Amino acid sequence: MPSENDGIMVILSSPSGAGKTTLINLLSKQNNFKISISHTTRQPRPNETPNKDYYFINDDEFKRLIKNQEFLEYAKVFNNYYGTSRTPVIDKLDKGKNVLFDIDWQGADQIKNKNLDYKLISFFILPPSKEILFERLSNRDMKDKLIVEERMKQFERDVLHWINYDYVVINDNLDECYSKISNLINAEINNGSKDYDPEFVRRHIEKLTS
Ligand code: ADP
Ligand code: 5GP
């Protein structure tokens, strides 16, 4: 059983571009929340800082970490490897810090299946519409139209994984979405009442997938 003093694990997943990195950065400003920094074999984006946004490593190094069983979870996403190393996460949780994970559905499944002794809350973030997702991806990955196209195609497959998450939240207005997630985390921690409408979510998913 998780001890009252342990931190909790908060996973945010989403189709690429829906805003989970932005939301995790906001959530991490709250006292006691720490981001789990992943390893990846992909190249850094111009605005990314090594060892802060990701540990950028090559394929050989990634394979070495797999072999040494250093990952809590890892997965191949868009032709690159991504993984969460176990020790820093467990250290933080044991010290009572809440850990934020920006990982895909494969990683979320792996962590859930481990049934660790820490409370876990999972969120799936959705864009308000496919048009707005396209706009956000185009603004972010301006130089690379191919990446935008690839990620829009992947959206159709990724969105289907919403069903395995505790909460699905729509990132239309950033502040409102942040408050929604923050309130749900607080309600989960304090056993408070939750402002969550599964029917609204279901209708939104129907709209996105029709
Ligand atoms: P993800 O991590 O899910 O791939 P990002 O957090 O990188 O997505 O967000 C994709 C882009 O959309 C970024 O340029 C970000 O600044 C922007 N963005 C995120 N949330 C919103 C929002 N609510 N309104 C407008 N733009 C947003
Ligand atoms: P990006 O390249 O846009 O930063 O991330 C691409 C995808 O990889 C996103 O869905 C992100 O959540 C996921 N991702 C990032 N780090 C990890 C990780 O450590 N493990 C897993 N499974 N996915 C990750």
Image (cartoon, rainbow, N blue to C red):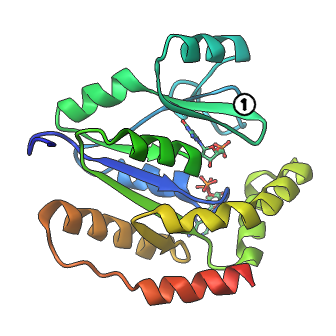
**Left or right side of 145 for 127:** left
User: Measured along the vertical axis of the image, is residue 74 above or below residue 113?
Assistant: above
Q: Is mark 1 within 8 Å of ligand 2?
A: yes
Q: Secondary structure at mark 1?
A: loop
Where is residue 100 shown, x and y percent of the image?
38, 45
**Left or right side of 68 for 158:** right
Query: Label 1 amino acid?
Result: Arg
Tell which residue pokes out farthest to the right in this image: 146
Count how many numbered circles sit on residues in the image: 1
Foreground residue among 76 and 195? 76
- Picture quarter with the C terminus: bottom right
Foreground residue among 62 and 47? 62
Please name the residue shown 64% across and 67% down the image: 160
Q: Residues within 10 Å of mark 1 (few under 14, many from 20)?
A: some
User: Measured along the vertical axis of the image, is residue 84 above or below residue 35?
Assistant: above
Please name the residue that numbered disc 1 is placed on: 42
User: Measured along the vertical axis of the image, is residue 5 above or below residue 135?
Assistant: above
**Left or right side of 101 for 135:** right
Please name the residue shown 67% across and 59% down the image: 17
Find ligand 2 in the image and state its quadrant: top right
**Left or right side of 9 for 5:** left
Where is residue 71 shown, x and y percent of the image?
48, 24
Foreground residue among 44 and 67? 67
Where is residue 185 shown, x and y percent of the image?
28, 62
Please name the residue shown 47% across and 58% down the image: 23
Q: Looking at the rendering, which quadrant does residue 150 occupy?
A: bottom right
Foreground residue among 191 and 113? 113
